[in-house]
Image (spheres, rainbow, N blue to C red):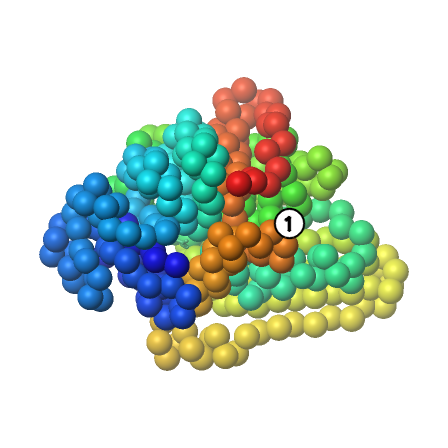
């Protein structure tokens, strides 16, 4: 697959380029960034551009879009108009309407839209889904997801935290991964009740904290918390509780805890997985090695998706990225009205 990368000089764009260069099934067709200096420095011999039209004139099959969210829509629409498949970073857009238009453009072009919810590939979170589906912890009762970091201290650019660029605050940033994780585990989220707060950083329209309850037609519910006030740094956690035990996945550090009971309150078998290989690799190199591995796994799934495979993939589709934004919006709406918000079942996105 010939892939062009937009935003190739960025922190994530560089990692995306690395995975394309390493995958034997992909070639880097071209790169695009805001200045020629940036684009050329990260082109690895591929043609470099600052003009979207010229970039899209290069023969290619797909694009990876790794720009900030607020500029994504026209790029996505142009790529679909050219008949390309798109793998884009999260959040899909800074507005619900923009995300809907992108999904509609993918549908009209009959092209795949993959969403960069790469945490699905982190071994501790993949393990949670595998255990859940194995039946080992019995019938699933509920889910708990958490994502947090220390907010504005981690950001370099205004687009990373101002609502006019990002679409909101913690819900649209670290929290968007965890909303997707909840949906990935429980199925479609069709009911949202939540409260978002904004006392700490005080950025207009950008919530510092959000707590919510999500419900799926399957009957499963998830509690959710996203925060910009976790002063210990980046933390993500997913827990699934069943009639015969529970499983927890966490990062960072990468870790799983599994408790399996022979009956409620009965004898417990406890297992912990600590991923020492990842801890050592991150210590010697960087946390980026874990992200790059997840992007490589996601790219492999994207290739399989485009090749027509439908089963056994972890990749998030356009509906996953749209629903994550709709849910974030629903938490804000619920905060204003005090009422739960009902959402129609989108289901998987078919091409
Ligand atoms: N999946 C993850 O875990 C993860 C982590 C961090 C960031 N992200 C997302 O990845 C995206 C990029 O984040 P980043 O940290 O790499 O940002 P960055 O600022 O380092 O990189 C963005 C790049 O896009 C370029 N760009 C901006 N507007 C452009 C345009 N109109 N056309 C072409 N290039 C343009 C910039 O010049 C820059 O090189 C964001 O959407 C962010 O939310 C995802």
Residue reaching furthest to the front: 59
Residue at the image position 28 percent from the left and 58 percent from the top: 29
Picture coordinates of residue 86, whole percent (x, y):
40, 46
Tally the numbered discs: 1
- Residue 189, given in percent of the width and then of the height, sits at 62, 36
For residue 280, above or below residue 243 = below
Residue at 35%, 76% in the rendered image: 285
Q: Residue 34: x, y in percent? A: 17, 47
Query: Which of the 4 quarters of the picture holds residue 186?
Result: top right
x 74%, y 38%: residue: 219
- Work out whether residue 7 or residue 198 is closer to the camera in this orientation and state it: 7
Between 334 and 91, which is closer to the camera in this rendering?
91
Picture quarter with the N terminus: bottom left
Q: Residue furthest top?
A: 337
Side (left or right) of 253 relative to 291: right
Q: Quadrant of residue 101?
A: top left
Asked if one can make out residue 210 in the rendered structure from this viewpoint, the answer is no
Horizontal and vertical percent position of residue 148: 46, 51
CA neighbours of label 1 inside 10 A, class few (<14), some (14 to 19), many (20+): many
Residue beneath the point at 37% across and 51% down: 62
Side (left or right) of 2 relative to 257: left
Height in image: 31 above or below 102?
below
Residue nearest the observer in this picture, 15 or 74 = 74
Mark 1 Cβ and ligand 1 under 8 Å apart? no
Q: Which residue is mark 1?
A: 185
**Is residue 212 visible from the viewing direction of this image?**
yes
Q: SS class of the residue under badge 1?
A: helix
Q: Is residue 103 above or below residue 336?
A: below
């Amino acid at each position: 697959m010939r892939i062009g990368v937009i935003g190739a000089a960025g922190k994530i764009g560089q990692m995306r380029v690395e995975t394309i260069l390493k995958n034997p099934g992909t070639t880097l067709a071209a790169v695009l960034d805001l200045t020629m200096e940036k684009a050329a420095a990260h082109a690895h011999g591929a043609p470099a551009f600052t003009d979207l039209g010229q970039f899209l004139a290069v023969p290619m099959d797909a694009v990876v879009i790794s720009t900030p969210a607020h500029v994504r829509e026209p790029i996505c629409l142009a790529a679909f108009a050219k008949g390309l498949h798109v793998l884009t970073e999260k959040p899909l857009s800074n507005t619900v309407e923009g995300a809907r238009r992108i999904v509609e453009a993918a549908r009209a072009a009959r092209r795949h839209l993959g969403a960069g919810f790469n945490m699905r590939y982190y071994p501790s979170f993949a393990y949670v889904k595998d255990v859940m589906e194995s039946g080992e912890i019995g019938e699933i009762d509920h889910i708990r997801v958490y994502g947090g970091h220390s907010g504005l201290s981690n950001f370099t650019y205004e687009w990373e935290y101002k609502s006019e660029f990002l679409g909101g605050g913690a819900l649209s940033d670290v929290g968007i991964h965890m909303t997707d994780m909840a949906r990935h585990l429980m199925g479609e989220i069709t009911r949202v009740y939540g409260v978002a707060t904004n006392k700490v950083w005080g950025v207009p329209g950008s919530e510092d904290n959000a707590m919510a309850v999500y419900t799926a037609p399957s009957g499963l519910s998830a509690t959710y918390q996203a925060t910009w006030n976790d002063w210990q740094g980046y933390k993500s956690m997913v827990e699934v509780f069943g009639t015969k035990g529970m499983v927890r996945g966490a990062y960072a550090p990468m870790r799983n805890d599994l408790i399996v009971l022979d009956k409620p309150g009965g004898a417990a078998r406890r297992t912990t997985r600590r991923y020492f290989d990842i801890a050592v690799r991150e210590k010697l190199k960087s946390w980026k090695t874990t992200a790059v591995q997840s992007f490589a796994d996601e790219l492999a799934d994207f290739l399989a998706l485009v090749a027509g495979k439908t089963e056994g993939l972890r990749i998030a589709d356009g509906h996953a990225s749209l629903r994550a934004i709709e849910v974030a919006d629903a938490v804000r709406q619920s905060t204003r009205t005090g009422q739960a918000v009902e959402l129609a079942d989108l289901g998987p996105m078919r091409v």
